[in-house]
Image: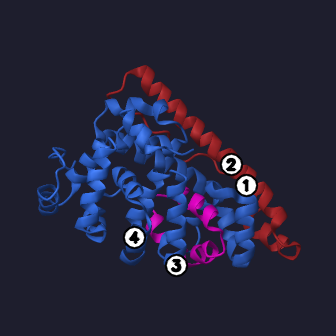
Amino acid sequence: MSAPRAGRRTPTPRPPAGLPDDHATELAEIVERALLDQRRNIADGLEGALARVPRILRGPVRKVAGG
Amino acid sequence: MTADVREAVAAGHPPEVLKFARLVGRAPEDVAVLADVPEQEARAYREAVTELLFDDAAGRLRPAAAAAPLLPTKVLAIIAEKALGPLVCARLASLVDGRRAADVAGHLDPPFLAEVAAELDPRRVAQVLRGIPTDTLVAAALELARAGEHVPMGRFVGSLDEAPLAACVEALSDEDLMRTGYVLEDMERLDAIFELVGDDRARRLLRDAREQGLDAEADVLVGHLDAARRARLLAEDDAPTATTEPA
């Protein structure tokens, strides 16, 4: 259960074209924040997960997970 | 974050605003500008953001998913509840074999399972839910309803096979069915749900909704029903004629 390491692969979608620029910018910032929150959530979760893996299995798990 | 649909409707938020708010973990007011664009565009944007979030998570969680088969399901369930949390579990559930995900789900407490269900990838929710026993699904549905999580319920309930769907419809209150129906992800399933609800309950549900000021919800539901059912329900009920037509 390695720490996250993948880079972003999908570009941030453009908000609907009919929105005024300031509203579109607000939405894009909200989406960016949601993405960062999710990444932090994943990093925190994975960090705690390995400690819960039975000691005898930690080596194989690390090997498969690349940690 | 939970979205109270009644308050949101009272505030004038259409379903797409509620769904987007739930997706990005914000209050509906924060994304209310989406009400200013056509529903189809708002939906397309939500789907693109869904893809962004879930694909980004998949890229980060694939190594952990690869290690999951090494661990017993009971151990995975403990790790899920004690370390990973519902969001990470839901993202992982999309990356592991569906049967194994269902096995792990069987070891989770219903409240936690409900939280996981609320975060499942909407593109794969049906696949993940398919292997979970009906009793467990009903318990999770009731937990979601209790938490006011009607947007995820709209995906969850709409993605169930017929038997668990029938059990959930029977277990959920009229109000929760109404709130869930308002934000149902796949409105094509609304008739199947109303078939299970039955005409008597449907009339009561619609009548009570209007008495409670939930006209917007009632209109959306009635507007998406099959024409024959709609005519039958409205003909035998005093509810005002709804003018909303399916998108």
Residue type at tag 2: Asn
Q: What residue does disc 4 label?
A: B170
Q: Earlier in the sequence, mark 3 or mark 4?
A: 3
Left or right: residue B85 versus residue A53 is: left
Q: CA distance from mark 2 to mark 3?
A: 29 Å
Colour applied to chain A: red
Circles 2 and 1: CB distance less than 8 Å?
yes
Same chain under badges 2 and 3? The reply is no
Q: What residue does disc 2 label?
A: A41
Q: How many marks?
A: 4
Q: CA distance from mark 2 to mark 4?
A: 35 Å
Q: Is residue B243 in sight in this rendering?
A: yes
Quick check: is B242 in the magenta stretch? no
Observer-side mark, 3 or 4, equals: 4
Residue type at tag 1: Gly
SS at circle 1: helix
Q: What residue does disc 1 label?
A: A45
Observer-side mark, 1 or 4, equals: 4
Quarter of the image holding residue B75? bottom right
Residue type at tag 4: Glu
Observer-side mark, 2 or 3, equals: 3
SS at circle 4: helix
Observer-side mark, 3 or 1, equals: 3
